[in-house]
Amino acid sequence: MTTLHARAAQGVTLAEALTATAFPTAVALLSTPHAHTVAHVTEGRCRTLQADPYDLSTVFEARVFDGERELRWLCDSGDRGRAVLLTEDETLLPDAFPEPVAPLPATAVLAAHYLLWGRPAGGDEEWTVLHTPRIGTLTVPHPRPDADRRLCLVTREYVSTDPRHGNAHVSEERLLRIETVPSDMQEDDHV
């Protein structure tokens, strides 16, 4: 059995949450009213290919992950919101997050993959520019893959069993990393 642990903090800015979690390096999915951005996080600072540091003042939702932990932050007033850090290793939970969250025991853990839209259209050893005609471009903090590869988001699903009825269901999903997959994979294929 695997247990997912979490702690939360209310009334913190995204910058405060990033400082408290102390990710040495991570990927951030940042949502603003006008854009969805994928950023690289280093020592509490978000940066993109276009902005270093990235301005967090208009971000209303963020998910930051490094393979071991995932930070979720949602703005609920001004620039402050609720932050929750999830991990399987309870020792990685920061003291700066004072609110305990009930542990989630999982009877099974499943790997899941989401193919990122767009094909590599540029980049270097640190960034990949994805492009699709219908949507446009998105820059992702991952080395540009070979021509025969695409990028996907790897997650871990936590399956729980209802104690009353015995039904199994995915009760939580944690983002892990971005990785490469064969380019002939289609959006509806599963890795």
Image (spheres, rainbow, N blue to C red):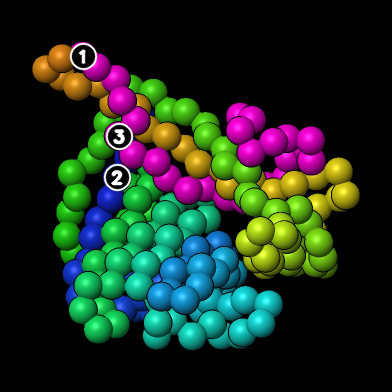
Is the residue marked by circle 3 packed among few (<14), some (14-19), or many (20+) residues within 10 Å?
Answer: some
Q: Quadrant of the C terminus?
A: top right
Give the SS element for disc 3.
strand
Query: Which residue is found at the position 48% from the left and 48% from the top?
Result: 175
> In the rendered structure, does residue 180 fall within the stretch colored magenta?
yes
Q: Is residue 119 visible?
A: yes
* Residue sitting at x 29%, y 82%: 79
Most foreground residue, 165 or 41? 165
Query: Is residue 168 magenta-colored?
Result: yes
Q: Measured along the vertical axis of the image, is residue 64 above or below residue 6?
A: below
Taking the spot 34% from the left edge, 30% from the top edge, the residue there is 170
Residue 102: quadrant of the picture: top left
Q: Mark 2 vs mark 3: give the one in front.
A: 3
Q: Which residue is mark 1?
A: 166
What kind of residue is marked 1?
A: Gly
Quarter of the image for residue 128 reads bottom right
Residue at far left of view = 164
**Where does the image place residue 152, in percent across and percent down from the top left?**
64, 46
Residue type beneath disc 3: Ser
The answer to whether residue 22 is seen in the rendering is: no
Residue 23 at what x, y percent from top left?
48, 65
Up the image or down, 156 lies above or below 73; here it is: above
Q: Earlier in the sequence, mark 2 or mark 3?
A: 2
Mark 2 to mark 3 CA distance (whole Å) = 13 Å
Outermost residue toward the top in this view: 166
Residue that badge 2 annotates: 5
Q: Mark 1 or mark 2: name the one nearer the start of the chain.
A: 2
What's the residue at 11%, 17% (across, down)? 164
Give the magenta-colored segment's residue range: 166-190
